[in-house]
């Protein structure tokens, strides 16, 4: 992807109404709170699976009918890719052309709404690249993800990643 | 909190300046938790992350709700330069949001290594590392690292920050 010279607009996610934080924490049951450990783990597994190029593990992160799309600072978009197969083909297509070791550092995981079988979750991304040239921060951004619980396992139904810079 | 000046150090920041300066103390041992306290830690972490999200996405109401009414925000750079205490939620929010007009980059307060000490049903101390990034014009920079020492209190089931100390490893 070419580097984008478009100026960053601070808090562009909120300005564009992609991100609209709840004003406060919401109270949920103990059982639902405990589910958040696994919800966060699904986010982390997505990062691990991509970086370690484990296609089966990456595949397992998504539902059969999942969607994946990206926005770069709200000025250009990638996707949407519809369905797990289309998402896998898109994602694994990066691997032959990325000769560096990428690390998707996923942090600041918060839950915005949650029911027994659905959840809306957001997280930060700090993407780092390691190569012979050294260590380079590539981009930051956020994930806005809807998951559903299928057969006891949380899976990604819709994923939107907002990049603060082109990657 | 006992604090020493580190201004005599030959180069700053002096490694482990938070501990040696008396700004930060991590309990040497972990304690057993019952399940209720363990679940509370999920909400304590949620509050810490929401503070970052609210500042970075410039959502003033969400930022305001991170703090108790009588909260205190204070800091220190390298154990040398205090950042004055700001007292009360309205004062804190006004001070924090005052940065937004001067920051043209996209900041991300990346919060990691959260540990909780002195936890009860209604109060907890949290120590957190921050990596602050800024994205602008095709360039991503690490602006600073720091630590937070937080006192959180539970109000009607919701965790809020009652006292925030930020220790900056570099000038900001």
Image (spheres, rainbow, N blue to C red):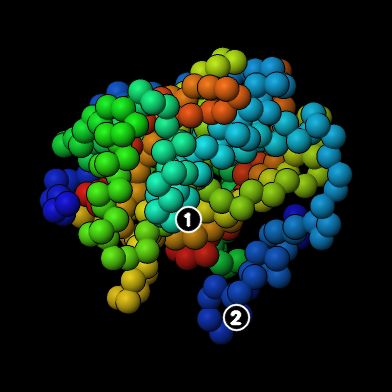
Residue A59 vs residue A3: left or right?
Answer: right
Q: Height in image: A47 above or below A27?
A: below
Query: Residue A11's x, y, as percent?
Result: 32, 36
Q: As rendered, which of B71 and A106 lies closer to the eye?
A: A106
Residue B38 sits in which quadrant?
top right
Name the spot of residue A28 as percent of width and height, x first: 65, 18
Residue at the spot 59% in from the left edge and 75% down from the top edge: B14
Q: Chain of mark 1?
A: B
In which quadrant is the N terminus of chain B drawn? bottom right
Looking at the image, can residue B113 be seen?
Answer: yes
Name the spot of residue B58 as percent of width and height, x first.
Answer: 38, 33
* Label 1: which secondary element: strand
The tag on residue B131 is: 1
- Residue B92 or residue B17, whichever sits in front: B17
Q: Give the quadrant of residue A14.
A: top left
Classify mark 2: residues with Cα within 10 Å, few (<14), some (14-19) or many (20+): few
Q: Between residues B6 and A165, which one lies in front from this camera angle?
A: A165
> Where does residue A138 sit, x and y in percent of width and height?
31, 57
Q: Is residue B59 left or right of residue B39?
A: left
Q: Residue at x 56, y 32 (%)?
A: A39
Mark 1 surroundings within 10 Å by alpha-carbon count, few (fewer than 14), some (14 through 19), many (20 or more) = some
């Amino acid at each position: 992807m070419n580097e984008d010279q478009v100026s960053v607009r601070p808090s562009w996610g909120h300005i564009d109404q992609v991100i609209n934080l709840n004003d406060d924490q919401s109270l949920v049951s103990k059982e639902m709170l405990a589910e958040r450990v696994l919800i966060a783990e699904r986010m982390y597994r997505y990062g691990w699976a991509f970086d370690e190029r484990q296609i089966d593990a990456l595949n397992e992160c998504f539902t059969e009918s999942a969607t994946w799309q990206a926005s770069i600072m709200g000025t250009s978009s990638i996707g949407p890719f519809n369905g797990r197969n289309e998402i896998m083909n898109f994602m694994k297509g990066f691997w032959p052309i990325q000769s560096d070791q990428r690390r998707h550092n996923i942090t600041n995981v918060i839950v915005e709404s949650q029911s027994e079988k659905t959840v809306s979750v957001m997280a930060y991304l700090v993407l780092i690249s390691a190569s012979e040239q050294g260590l380079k921060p590539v981009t930051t951004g956020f994930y806005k993800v809807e998951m559903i619980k299928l057969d006891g396992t949380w899976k990604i139904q819709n994923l939107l990643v907002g990049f603060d810079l082109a990657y | 909190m006992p604090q020493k000046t580190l201004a005599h150090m030959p180069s700053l920041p002096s490694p482990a300046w938070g501990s040696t300066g008396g700004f930060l103390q991590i309990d040497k041992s972990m304690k057993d938790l019952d399940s209720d306290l363990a679940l509370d830690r999920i909400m304590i972490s949620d509050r810490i992350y929401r503070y970052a999200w609210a500042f970075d996405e410039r959502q003033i109401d969400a930022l305001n709700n991170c703090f108790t009414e009588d909260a205190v925000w204070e800091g220190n750079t390298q154990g040398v330069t205090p950042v004055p205490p700001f007292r009360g939620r309205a004062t804190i929010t006004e001070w924090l949001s005052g940065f937004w007009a001067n920051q043209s980059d996209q900041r991300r307060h990346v919060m990691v290594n959260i540990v909780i000490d002195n936890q009860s049903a209604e109060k907890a101390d949290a120590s957190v590392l921050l990596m602050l990034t800024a994205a602008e014009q095709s360039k991503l920079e690490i602006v600073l690292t720091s630590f937070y020492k937080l006192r959180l209190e539970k109000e009607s089931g919701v965790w809020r920050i009652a006292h925030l100390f930020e220790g900056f490893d570099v000038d900001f």
